[in-house]
Image (cartoon, rainbow, N blue to C red):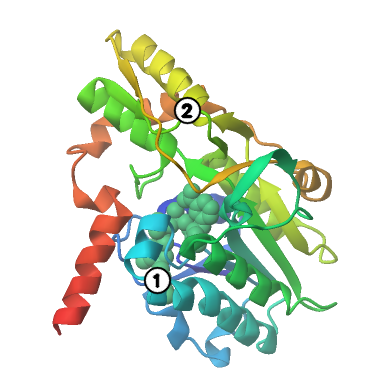
């Protein structure tokens, strides 16, 4: 049985991915600090641990490692830039380094299209320049480069440069574009668009899981960075689709408020390489994502609960640490 260690596997993507891997017959071990709790299927092997504390011996016997840890958005990275560069830049390199020494055959890194920065509305592929100049983007690029540096014949490294991932996971986040608009539409009856012309590649978390699965299943000769997203949308387009879907589902009127705030991220990507080499074929558009979120409405309870917003939980944890 293929043994997979998932670092950060109790987060938003991990909580959706781990059950998929288990259904496909993989033996999964999760190592996670459990910042946002543990909503993994009962019986999942979970070690509450800092990944930096793992040693080569801990990784012996695993076939593959999937890295989903670190600080996963701009507000966290900006709140604690030093920690961001350590957890996002250095940690993936350290983990890949000890994994390779332990005989692990493949390391899959959750990278981000954030590293493209502010582009000029061209379609970016994996060879395009990376222009980010903000902590989160730079650190994700550093993490990716550190991991890719270790690739050789016996050690495959794959970086999935994900667009913004949205949709339903047992560990919910309402700080991701579509999910935020879903919450605002339902709770406030109004969706605010900070800048309608900014481009973003987006992906439902079910397609993100499919991308990780395809990377795990890929031929051992395959390595490299791959853009993965469903499609590119302007923020204005996203708002219109979310509004339309929500109005149809609820029968309520929902307003749109358009602002003209500056954004330092603007990018469109092509996922042709992932389609060709990984057989990645995303299925879920924005309307599907909204339908799925709506189906789980009863589970969410109080939308203002801090556990839905990474920065709120993270700030509290950092403040507790500083007070010790
Ligand atoms: N969600 C997105 O839209 C998106 C897009 C592109 C890339 N990514 C990347 O995908 C990964 C997963 O994203 P997510 O949305 O599931 O994030 P998340 O914040 O929900 O989960 C991260 C998990 O990692 C754990 N963790 C963090 N640092 C750790 C450490 N040092 N040791 C052990 N556990 C640690 C946390 O406890 C948490 O459970 C991240 O690396 C993120 O940068 C996410």
- Disc 1 within 8 angstroms of ligand 1 (CB): no
Instruction: Specify the label residue 196 is tagged with.
Output: 2
C-alpha gap between disc 2 and disc 1 = 28 Å
Q: Please name whichever residue, 37 or 316, is drawn nearer the observer in this view of the structure.
A: 316
Neighbour class for label 2 at 10 Å: few (<14), some, many (≥20)?
Answer: some
**Position of residue 291 measured from the top left corner of the image (x, y, whole percent):** 43, 23
In this rendering, position of residue 62 left or right of residue 276: left
Which residue is at a point 64% across and 33% down the rendered structure image?
Answer: 231
Quadrant where the image shows the N terminus: bottom right
Residue lying at 65% horizontally and 48% vertically, measured from the top left? 211
Left or right placement of residue 287 versus residue 261 in this view: right
Q: Position of residue 148 (x, y in %)?
A: 72, 72
Q: Pinpoint residue 58: horizontal percent, then vertical percent.
A: 52, 87
| Image-based side of 105 in relation to 39, left or right | right
| Residue topped by disc 1 | 81
**In this image, 204 relative to 159: left or right?**
left
């Amino acid at each position: 049985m293929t043994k997979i260690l998932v670092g950060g596997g109790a987060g938003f993507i991990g909580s959706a991915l781990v059950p998929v891997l288990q259904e496909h017959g993989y033996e999964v071990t999760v190592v996670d600090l459990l910042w946002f709790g543990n909503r993994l299927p009962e019986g999942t092997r979970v070690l509450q641990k800092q990944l930096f504390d793992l040693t080569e011996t801990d990784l012996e016997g695993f076939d593959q490692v999937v890295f989903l840890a670190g600080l996963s958005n701009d507000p966290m990275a900006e709140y604690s830039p030093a920690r961001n560069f350590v957890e996002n830049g250095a940690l993936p390199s350290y983990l890949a380094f000890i994994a390779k020494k332990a005989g692990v055959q493949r390391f899959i890194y959750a990278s981000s299209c954030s590293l493209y920065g502010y582009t000029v509305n061209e379609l970016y592929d994996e060879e395009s320049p990376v222009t980010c100049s903000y902590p989160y983007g730079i650190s994700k690029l550093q993490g990716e480069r550190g991991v890719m540096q270790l690739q050789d014949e016996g050690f495959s490294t794959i970086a999935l440069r994900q667009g913004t991932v949205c949709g339903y996971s047992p560990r919910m986040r309402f700080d991701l574009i579509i999910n935020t608009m879903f919450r605002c539409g339902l709770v406030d009856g109004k969706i605010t668009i900070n800048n309608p012309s900014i481009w973003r590649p987006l992906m439902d978390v079910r397609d993100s899981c499919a991308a990780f699965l395809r990377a795990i299943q890929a031929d051992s000769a395959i390595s490299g960075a791959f853009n993965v997203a469903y499609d590119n949308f302007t923020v204005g387009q996203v708002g219109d689709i979310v509004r339309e879907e929500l109005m149809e589902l609820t029968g309520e009127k929902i307003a749109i408020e358009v602002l003209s705030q500056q954004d330092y991220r603007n990018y469109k990507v092509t996922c042709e390489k992932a389609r060709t080499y990984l057989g990645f074929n995303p299925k879920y558009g924005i309307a599907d994502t909204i339908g799925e979120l709506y189906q789980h409405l009863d589970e969410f309870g109080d939308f203002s609960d801090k556990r839905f917003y990474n920065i709120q939980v993270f700030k509290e944890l950092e403040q507790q640490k500083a007070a010790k």
